């Protein structure tokens, strides 16, 4: 029997192959490879999709976070609050601005940033809180706004998600990643910042193009972080199918909920008010490492997002701290294959293999 991957990029490509080929030819004919009309069109389309006024394409999600943080003023001498259980990029982006990362624990049910812990960590030096919309559902941004500091949302896993009908970035600024495996994935690295603030959007665009918006004008010490036209072609083709893809992910998640109901696993919880886009379907199991090994041996691409909390990595061990919920989750969570094209038959095989792995 064929292997069931964690993410099926070949199936995703098959749906857009023709459009991508036509678009690549268009870019090759125009030879506008960095920025240009294809990128401008994608930025407009993604801003509209996201329900915000501005989208600035950048080179990857980590840059998007760094530039968004810099736009709200994070830098040396300031602090940024973020969850201990996230992909390392969130912490890297904070550190790269020169601000001090301040970690807080997660909610043990949803794995999202512990809202009250984040609010309690605010000091006069806090420039921003960076909640991560982990696995495809949004953190409680409304409540975090009560802090009065800027909310820089890590929306790398949540393209299309909403909370009480509002998308990421709508009330502030959000960074996203178009790494190939994300819900909206490019064919290489890419990312974007979305915001309805014209001022923040301009700062991000300026920082991302060597600190100036006109050639050889450099008002700020910026970086080179721009979106390539070939990536914009892929993103434009895939964007038209994103809402449908997210709906298919929701159906797949509901199917897993049913299939796993009788097993000794904790299935994911969607927070009230959230429209989840299921970037990851994360369950919690006993003897996790053994279960992952057995699943992989059975041809099921199981993953772990993430096995090491930020404060336990070599890079950020100096931050110290103890975050029991994040630490416990890191040893018990595992991610099952999920993507729009996954079939009920494949999901049944995943559930059977998981049941067998748990019994073994
Ligand atoms: C993917 C991801 C990023 C970083 O994106 P890159 O494009 O790989 O730099 C940041 N945060 C989270 C939560 C992610 O999943």
Image (spheres, rainbow, N blue to C red):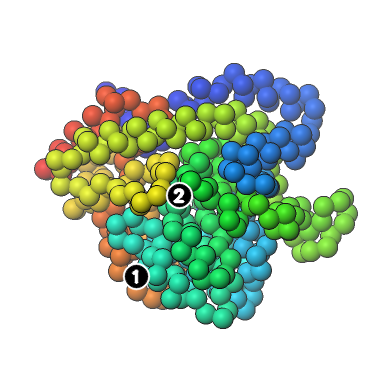
Q: Which residue sits furthest left?
A: 359
Observer-nearest of 142 and 246:
142
Observer-nearest of 152 and 70:
152
| Real-space CA distance between mark 1 and mark 2, rounded to the nearest whole angstrom | 29 Å
For label 2, the crowd category at 10 Å Cα-Cα, with few meaning under 14, some 14 to 19 and many 20 or more, is few
**SS at circle 1:** loop
Q: Which residue does the image show at 41% across and 66% down from the upper left? A: 115
**SS at circle 2:** loop
- Is residue 204 something that shows in the picture? no
Q: Which residue does the image show at 48% across and 46% down from the upper left? A: 165
Tell me where residue 197 sits by quadrant: bottom right
Which is nearer the N-term, disc 1 or disc 2?
2
- Residue 164 has which mark? 2
In this rendering, position of residue 181 left or right of residue 24: left
Observer-nearest of 14 and 314:
14
The residue that label 1 is drawn on is 323
């Amino acid at each position: 029997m064929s292997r069931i991957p964690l993410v099926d990029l070949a199936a995703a490509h098959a749906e857009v192959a023709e459009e991508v080929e036509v678009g690549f030819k268009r870019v090759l004919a125009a030879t506008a490879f960095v920025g240009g009309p294809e990128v401008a069109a994608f930025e407009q389309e993604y801003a509209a999709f996201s329900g915000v006024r501005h989208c600035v394409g950048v080179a990857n999600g980590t840059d998007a976070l760094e530039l968004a943080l810099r736009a709200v003023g994070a830098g040396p001498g300031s602090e940024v609050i973020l969850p201990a259980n996230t992909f390392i990029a969130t912490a890297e982006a904070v550190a790269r601005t020169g601000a001090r990362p301040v970690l807080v624990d997660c909610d043990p049910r949803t794995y999202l940033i512990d809202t009250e812990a984040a609010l309690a960590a605010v000091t006069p030096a806090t420039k921003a809180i960076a909640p991560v919309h982990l696995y495809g559902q949004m953190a409680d941004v409304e409540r975090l706004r009560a802090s009065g500091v800027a909310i820089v949302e890590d929306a790398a896993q949540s393209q299309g998600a909403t909370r009480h009908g509002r998308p990421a970035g709508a009330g502030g600024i959000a960074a996203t990643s178009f790494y190939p495996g994300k819900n909206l994935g490019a064919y290489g690295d890419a990312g974007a910042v979305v915001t309805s603030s014209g001022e923040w959007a301009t700062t991000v665009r300026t920082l991302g193009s060597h600190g100036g918006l006109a050639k050889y004008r450099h008002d700020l010490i910026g970086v080179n972080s721009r979106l390539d036209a070939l990536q914009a072609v892929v993103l434009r083709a895939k964007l038209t199918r994103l809402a449908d893809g997210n709906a298919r992910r929701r159906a797949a998640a509901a199917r897993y909920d049913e299939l796993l109901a009788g097993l000794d696993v904790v299935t994911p919880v969607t927070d009230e008010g959230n429209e989840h886009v299921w970037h990851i379907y994360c369950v919690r199991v006993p003897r996790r490492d053994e279960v992952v090994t057995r699943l992989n041996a059975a041809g099921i691409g199981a993953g772990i997002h993430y096995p090491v909390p930020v404060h336990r990595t070599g890079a950020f061990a100096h931050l110290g701290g103890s975050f029991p919920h994040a630490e416990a989750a890191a040893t018990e969570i595992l991610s099952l294959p999920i993507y729009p094209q996954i079939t009920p038959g494949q999901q049944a095989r995943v559930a059977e293999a998981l049941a067998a792995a748990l019994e073994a």
